Image (spheres, grey):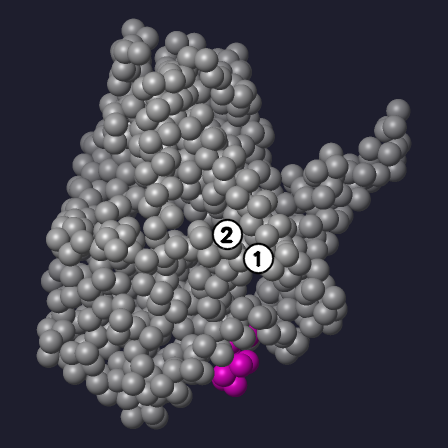
Amino acid sequence: MIGQWFLKIPSLNELATSVQQWGIIIAAFAMGLGSVNIIIRNVHRIQKREGTDWLYAIWLLAIFFLFAIVGIGFGSASSQYRYIFNTILQPLSATMYPATLFFLVSAIYRTFKTRTVEGGLFVIVGAIILVANAPVMAATFPFLVSVKSWIMDVELTAAYRAILLGIGLGAIMLGFRVIFGLETTHLGREEET
Amino acid sequence: MASKQDGVWIKLQHIPREILYFLIIISMIVPLLRPMGLPITISPQTRSLFDSLNTLEPADVMLEFVDWSAGSMSFHQPGCIAVSFQAVKRGAKLVFLSTSTEGPLMYELMLEKFQSVFDEADYVYGEDYVYLGYVAGEETARAAIASDIRTAFSSDYYGTSLDEIPLMQRVHNYADYSMIISYTMGSPESFVRQFNTQYGVITHIHCGEMMTPTILPFWASGQITGLLNGGVGAAEMEVLVKRPGDAVKLTDVYSFSNILVFVFLIIGNIGFIMQRRKGE
Amino acid sequence: MIIASGKVVDFIALILIWAVAAVFVWIVGGKRFTIRRMVAIDVIEEAVGRAVETEKAVVMNIGGGGLLRGEYAPATMAGLTVLGYVAGLTARLGADLIAPMYSDGGVETIPVATELIRDAYMAEGEVERFDAEEMIPFLPVQASVMALADRVRPAANIMVGYYWHESCIWAEAFGRIGAIQVGGTTNLYQIPFFAGACDYVLIGEEVYPISAYISKDPKLIATIVGQDAFKWIAAILIILGTILVSFGNQWLTQFLSM
């Protein structure tokens, strides 16, 4: 893949395309593996019948098989599949994601305090961005937009580029360690030094 | 000894979360029930996307990655509708596809609202627009789509072979895409890596507000041409294409909720600072 | 030219990075180098100790990035490294460990995590305390982890891996119950949430040297030194480039774009 990115060698590109196709196939298999794993674990939970968790396991498997049977039987483009998606998954998913807002508000209120100089700067910048992100404030006080743009385009961009650089170099070095067998701690094996 | 005033400052720092959440809910419900039509300013990133869309010609093909989920549908769908509307107005051809599992259903829901635009513009499925469906693999799939779309898709979402679809007969790889736009909450940088960095394809992103700060460096460096910032970006796009819709309705909610969070931040810090001063 | 245009310098830089790393690992050696103190990792042992004293559990979460997706796998590997370390500590000190596995893309890590924790308990001679069902619950949605926080009320919550918006929700849920929190991720969007809500944070690349820091393996430390050498080079190029561009000289920009 590295070769495909940097080198103009047709046979290497063909090999890389093959690998990409294998990657797509493996990803699909991983989803299948995950599904089997979910079924096995929840069946165990039902067999154990400890507490009330096993009731949720029954519910999970019921919804799982409902979607699987309707999807396989009628097709994922069918009106039946779309109906159960629109009535079950879509509203619940749409509800969970915005729940982030409430926890975010709670976290901002609880933790963003001017305990130190850096904390104070954090609060000031956060407050400016919060207010400038409100469309009505941005339209009413255009200077807020300029300040926010400066913070985002200069300060934030610089900081994120530095972090990105570090992450990029770290990932390259991690790849080096994995390829040459130096990094095995995530597998639980201890190499003799 | 703690005085009554100290108690006030401590209470300011410990407002029950039930009250916080209740006020947040009110700040969202009231503007939805009584829209105020508060003003919207257009950001340079949205303007950049709009200007780029205005360079589209009838022979051009734009790839639209329908990668949003139900959770972000409230802003991604209006954003997609506004962008697609402008592309259709320019006569460009649209290839919709998904690299996220909920994509196909999100496309169907979007199409319910957008079909009338296709009908008014006499757009024919297979000739002017097509939906290829979902392909697993995320960045691997995106890389495959960029290098040769037929390694990722052999047929469209409805099972028709790509070679039998008139539009797809001339769409093979990056050289045939005039621009791409990704509506995603996943990994927008992967689109930059696989399309713009690798092949120089014009790339636009519509992502959530929390992701915009990290995507801005790519816009500043020119690797992303247009960037829609969550719901506010979708509303700005609706204003630019002169088709206010669901996103514009939500801007009042954004305004109120942002201001309310700012007020909570200030109240908490006033309580903290005053308590510390009294304690000194 | 065999190298794609616009990527010549990038390719040479990649080869150089690997070459320098190889020199440091196999020729210079890492014994003479040390990594600076990483407070977020050091505090994990204290957190496990506190869990033992208060008879509460330690929750260790490796995120939902999984091992199959190239962008997320490095952070997940770092999370697995920390999981092995935490499992060793809890086995040795006698604390309860709960390592919830989140469904979003992380299911392939469950067998890996199970073996990792089992090996750690076996190494400490505590294999009879290992119970995969209790220690590694499969929690399909974000709300289940929040429910875990409320039910278990752990003394410590360690989150190292790849996270999306659930980072804020979980950090707040565990923070509210008073758990010591250590957070680390390479997902740029979530770093601010960890920085705000966690007691100790690993920012971006700080998750990568964890294995070197914990194991003190000279070869791993040598790769960190090689990485740092290139950070210096990058910093010098940035400063030089900024000065040159400010005076209207595009030489360095053009050279790096070759």
Quarter holding the N terminus of chain C is bottom left
Q: Position of residue B80 (x, y in %)?
A: 40, 73
Q: Is A170 in front, or is C226?
A: C226
Residue B237 colored in magenta in the image: yes
Q: Amino acid at mark 1?
A: Asn
Do labels 1 and 2 touch, CB within 8 Å? Answer: yes
Badge 1 and badge 2 in a common chain? yes
Residue C117 colored in magenta in the image: no
Which residue position holds label 1?
C249
Residue at image x 19%, y 78%? B170
Residue at image x 63%, y 74%? B41
Q: Which residues are magenta?
A: B235-243
Secondary structure beneath dot 1 equals loop
Q: CA distance from mark 1 to mark 2?
A: 8 Å
Which residue position holds label 2?
C252
**Which quarter of the figure has residue B197?**
bottom left
C230 to the left or right of B61: right
As drawn, C6 above or below B62: above
Q: Position of residue C240 (x, y in %)?
A: 57, 46
Secondary structure beneath dot 2 equals helix
Q: Position of residue B1 (x, y in %)?
A: 88, 24
Chain of the residue where label 2 is placed in the rendered structure: C
